[in-house]
Image (cartoon, rainbow, N blue to C red):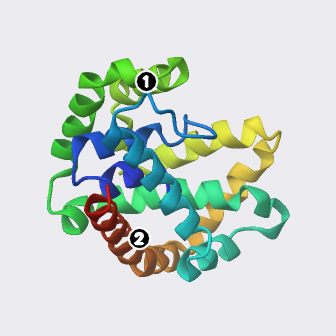
Amino acid sequence: MNFLAHCALATADDDLIVGGFLGDFVKGTVPDTLPKLVARGVRLHRRIDAFSNTEPHIRSSVARLPEAHRRLAPPFVDLLADHLLARDFECCHGEALGDFTDRVHAAIERREVWLGASARRYFAFMRDTALLHRYQDLSTVARAFERIAARFGRSEAVAPFMACVETHFDAFAADFAGYYPRLTAHADDWIATAAANP
């Protein structure tokens, strides 16, 4: 999952949301210096990623993408999930996407002291460009994927991946409808278990 989904799946608590955002920036052991619930949010992020790696509907989405660039399929599916979630955010979470985006920004701003330099830079970009809200537009997925593909030296993957999504959009959306409720239930169960066993 990407930033919107990780924050949304941690929506029970603002500290968990911040941890969900930080999950892509904290490597290795979760630092003891992080507040307890922020650290728990980082662990939730990792738990969601681990669950996603084995989820059958997500694997179906990965398999739909061109085999020649299959190494880039998992991060692309994560980006596409944010688009599909953004389109139906209120249905999935009972809150308008704009309101949720404002809440995420406010939560991170209040805890910005816990962000490292790279997380702080990315948060400024995310906030200033209204990135979470703009995931409603498929072109935002294309631009984000362009940056990922360029890092791997595989910029030629962008056009066939986006063409595949346009051709098989309904199938990708059906995959999302299969896996996102399972991710939500898994995250909710993990949060409840962690709260009961602090």
Q: Residue furthest front?
A: 197
Q: Amino acid at mark 2?
A: Leu
| CB-based contact (under 8 Å), mark 2 and mark 1 | no
Q: Which mark is residue 183?
A: 2
Q: Answer few, some or many: residues within 10 Å of disc 2's Cα (few below 14, many 20 plus, some between 14 and 19).
A: some
Instruction: Give coordinates of residue 34: x percent, y percent.
Output: 40, 31
Can residue 114 be seen from the camera position used here? yes
Figure disc tally: 2
Quarter location, residue 181: bottom left
- Callout 1: 10 Å neighbours few (<14), some, many (20+)? many
Kindly identify which numbered label has been placed on residue 115.
Answer: 1
Residue at point 58%, 82% (across, down): 56
Which of marks 1 and 2 precedes in the sequence? 1
Q: Decide which of 34, 114 is in the foreground and name it.
A: 34
Q: Residue at x 63, y 76 (%)?
A: 59
How far separated are the C-alphas under marks 2 and 1? 26 Å
105 relative to 178, above or below? above
Q: Quadrant of residue 108?
A: top left
